[in-house]
Image: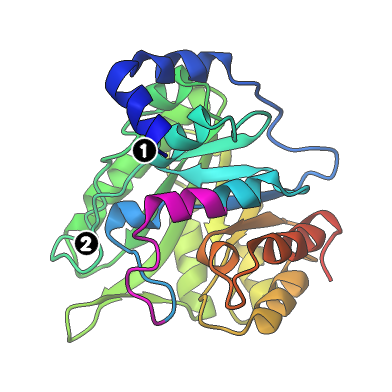
Amino acid sequence: MAELTEIRVRHPERLAEAWQRRRTRGLVGEDGRLLIVAADHPARGALGVRGDRMAMASRPDLIARLMTALERPGVDGVLATPDILEDLLLLGALEGKVVIGSMNRGGLQGAAFEVDDRFTAYRTADEIASRRLDGGKMLTRIDLGDPGTVSTLESSAAAVTGLAEHKLMAMVEPFWSTRAEDGRVTNLLDPDSVIKSIHIASALGATSAYTWLKLPVVDELDRVMEATTLPTLLLGGDPTVAPEATYASWGKALSLPSVRGLVVGRALLFPPDGDVAAAVDHAATLVHGGGA
């Protein structure tokens, strides 16, 4: 990690050069499925995992866990903010991997403006394309009681259109959200709320040709997935749930035709037993083995 800092001090231009040299790949392989490891929570100040509210605070530890995950067979790529991706880039961990840039991280966890998810990381499709990334991801929370929602929708629509112009994946992560009495933003995960969020997210932008959805695993998922023909990646879910239950829910969901893989962060990077490689291997078997 000290070497990374030294490069940033003395040779920051190497980052731009490394993006241009990076060996890329097609978005999907023969099976049309993806397993993406996510690491964009810290940029929103969301560092907690289970009972440890600062679990993701150490950058060397997080990078080490990501390196372990990306080295495992069946892991297609990573979703993260520029700072994390650039560390991985300098370490050579992104060669031949799908790289998705996280775009809007301005809705800081616990903030009064949390639902106003400003684009503060990769802000435009041009920034993603110039670095030869494979796509961009936008969190799109919909709270009918929060005026910040409309700017999030407008910005997400612009990003979808811009990414499509570059023929890059637009990964939209919609939630129907509300603010509880204690001020916390809560995502409603009942089937009807998820279905409404899907319909709104699917219509963002001038074309949906390159749009993929990132959705939670919820009850009645077969009915939920009837809401769209867009390819969908399932998010990792609550890391407090027992791994066996999580794997079972993933396996069942992956049997649905529009579900094309997983985007998982904390559940794989911080498993209860600490064995990142084993957790990743299990997820890779589910994704590329066609589910349970």
| Up/down of 98 relative to 53, above or below | above
The tag on residue 83 is 1
Question: Can residue 173 be spotted in the picture?
Answer: yes
Q: Point out the tag, 2 or 1, that comes first from the N-terminus.
A: 1
* Amino acid type of the residue that numbered disc 1 sits on in the rendered structure: Asp
Residue 268 occupies quadrant: bottom right
User: Label 1 neighbourhood size at 10 Å, few (<14), some (14-19), many (20+)?
Assistant: few
| Up/down of 235 relative to 157, above or below | below
Point out residue 62 in the picture as x, y percentages from the top left corner.
46, 54
Which quadrant: the N terminus? top left
Q: Residue drawn at (52%, 39%), measured in percent from left and top?
A: 100
Secondary structure, mark 1, is: helix
Q: Is residue 169 magenta?
A: no
* Amino acid type of the residue that numbered disc 2 sits on in the rendered structure: Glu
Q: Is 251 positioned to the left or the right of 243 in the image?
A: right
Point out residue 245 in the picture as x, y percentages from the top left corner.
68, 83
| Up/down of 105 relative to 6, above or below | below
Viewer-closest of 226 and 234 = 234
Residue 93 occupies quadrant: top right
Q: Which residue is mark 2?
A: 114
Question: Can residue 209 be spotted in the picture?
Answer: no
Viewer-closest of 177 and 72 = 72
Residue range in magenta is: 51-65
Q: Residue drawn at (76%, 60%), measured in percent from left and top?
A: 281
Q: CA distance from mark 2 to mark 1?
A: 21 Å
Q: Residue drawn at (49%, 58%), measured in percent from left and top?
A: 199
Q: Is residue 63 magenta?
A: yes
Secondary structure, mark 2, is: loop
Viewer-closest of 179 and 49 = 49
